[in-house]
Structures are given as C-alpha cells and as structure tokens.
Amino acid sequence: MLDSASQSHFITERCVQRLRLSRTQTHAQIHGISTVNTETHHSVSIYLRSRHTEWHTTLKCAILYHIIGTTPSTNFDTSTWMIPMDNKFSHELFDQREYIDLLIGADLFYEMLRSERRTRPGNYPVL
C-alpha cells in the first residue's frame, strides 16, 4: 500500500517471519490519525524492485503487528473498467480483499508516481 501521508515505511511481523528477514533493534513512537499512538522496537531493511522495469530501492521499515485491516473493505468488480491488456499491476488481485503487509511512505510514494502511469476517462483509478 502506498500512503502519501506516512512519514515512515512499515512492514508486518507476519511478513518479516515469512521472509525470514533479519531485524534490527530500534525503538520508535508512531503517532497516527485521531491521536492513535503505538510504538515499535524493531526494524528491517528490505530491497524492492519492479517486476516490469529497472526500478529498485532499499527501504528501512518499522515492524508492526498489523498495519491496517483488509483492503479494499469488500471485493469489487472491475470487469467493466476496460483495463488495457498490456497494463502491469504491482498486484494483479488489487480488487480482492487482502491484508496489507507493507506500507510505503510519502518519500517513495511521490517517486513512484513520477514513473509511467496511465489514466482512463471517467471515475477510474490511475493505472
């Protein structure tokens, strides 16, 4: 998930365990919307790369038990969207409910938006 308001990057404990990532002890206070606060005691460095381009980066992510519930809140039908067949998504099942294991913060969010993107007329998301 890309979050244009987040100042940090986050990863779930579940993802860290599945990928067997090496953690570093770090303590950070996290302040959220509606004065919801939490803290983390560990972080990991992860290497991200595109499956479709040469883009890549390394991120330091704070480890949280949960980032957010499932998203989208319900599955939705995209059959009428006429998405171009050559469009490549970071997640092909973006329209299906799923847990979020990685939240990418604002600094990388805007860098990623500068890359190639496509739009369609009407009330559709940016591809």
Image (spheres, rainbow, N blue to C red):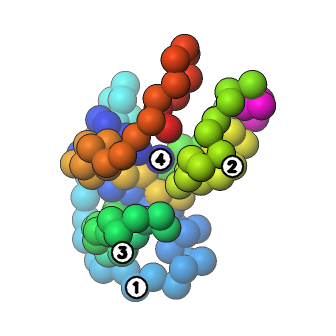
Q: Position of residue 59 (x, y in %)?
A: 29, 67
Measure the alpha-carbon separation of dots 3 and 1.
12 Å
- Residue behind mark 3: 47
The type of residue carrying mark 2 is Leu
Q: Nearer the viewer, mark 4 or mark 1?
A: 4
The residue at which mark 4 appears reads as 1
Q: Position of residue 70 (x, y in %)?
A: 65, 43
**Within 10 Å of the Cα at label 1, are there few (<14), some (14-19), or many (20+) other Cα atoms?**
few
**Is 97 situated above or below 10?**
above
Q: Which residue is mark 2?
A: 93
Figure disc tally: 4
Question: CA–CA distance between discs 2 and 3?
Answer: 22 Å
The residue mark sitting in front, 3 or 1, is: 3
Residue identified by numbered label 1: 22
Mark 2 or mark 3: whose residue is earlier in sequence = 3
Considering the whole magenta stretch, tell me its main secondary structure: loop
Which circle, 4 or 2, is nearer the viewer? 2
Q: Which amino acid lies under the numbered mark 4 shown in the image of this protein?
A: Met
Circle 4 residues within 10 Å: few <14, some 14–19, many ≥20: some
Q: Residue at x 47, y 47 (%)?
A: 1
Q: Secondary structure at mark 3?
A: strand
| Highlighted magenta segment, given as a residue range | 74-79
